Amino acid sequence: MEVIGAEDPFIGLSLLTQHDFDLIILDLTIPGMDGLEVITKIREVTNIPIIISSARDDITDKIIGLERGADDYMPKPYDPRELVTRIKTILRRTHTTQETIKQTPIFTIDEKSRIITFKNEMLELTAAEFDILSMLIKHKNGSISREQLLYESEHIDDESSVKNIDVIISRIRQKIAKIDSEKSYIKPVRGIGYMLTDRQ
């Protein structure tokens, strides 16, 4: 298991926009923000599994944590082997779900031809639109910041404003809507950027 730690909750929330994590282990006693509030912030941008690991053993904390979207609650102290077992159990369940989703993708990318298809229909995209949409697809069901979309695109000037991302996103949405206008597949994430979901 590869672990990335964050002592500050704001740094931790920022890391969620930079990496594709499989699971979060969250302490409730952290500086700057109560851990229960962090759960709410996480659930605004992703459904990533959360295990609360805390010395706070108040039943109210456990109930609130689970109600806000945590998947498990482990009061300290505990045997690390139990934590590993619970991590494996949750990941086995969530990865099985993800594999089922991947079997029937709505969006597909052909990197060599720089073609993206949506529901088996090719989208007519500019180079910048391809860059942005492909990044969203690769981070699907997770948020990605406007800054990351801007600076990692090969076809957008680094000195462009992040507002240009909003314009490009709007154009991509319009092209997707020509094929399916029933659902918004690209959703704004307040204070961060955007998230693409292909879940029906």
Image (cartoon, rainbow, N blue to C red):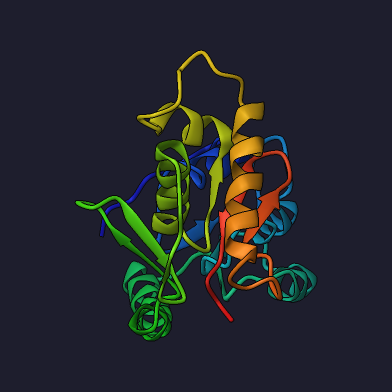
Residue 73 lies in quadrant? bottom right
Residue 120 lies in quadrant? bottom left
Location of residue 184 in the rendering, given as x and y in whole percent from the top left corner: 68, 65
In the current view of this chain or complex, which residue is farthest to the left?
A: 112
Q: Quick check: 104 above or below 158?
A: below
Location of residue 180 in the rendering, given as x and y in whole percent from the top left corner: 62, 73
Q: Quick check: 181 above or below 187?
A: below
Judging depth in this view, the residue of 14 and 37 nearest the camera is: 14
Residue 179 lies in quadrant? bottom right
Looking at the image, which residue is at 63% across and 42% down? Answer: 193
Q: Quadrant of the C terminus?
A: bottom right
Q: Quadrant of the N terminus?
A: bottom left
Q: Quick check: 60 above or below 114?
A: below
Decide if residue 28 is in sight here.
Answer: yes
Location of residue 86 in the rendering, given as x and y in whole percent from the top left corner: 41, 78
Looking at the image, which residue is at 33% across and 71% down? Answer: 84
In the rendered view, does 198 fall on the left or right side of 79? right
In the rendered view, does 75 fall on the left or right side of 153? right
Judging depth in this view, the residue of 21 and 168 nearest the camera is: 168
Looking at the image, which residue is at 59% across and 34% down? Answer: 165
Location of residue 5 in the rendering, given as x and y in whole percent from the top left corner: 42, 43
Decide if residue 27 is in sight here.
Answer: no
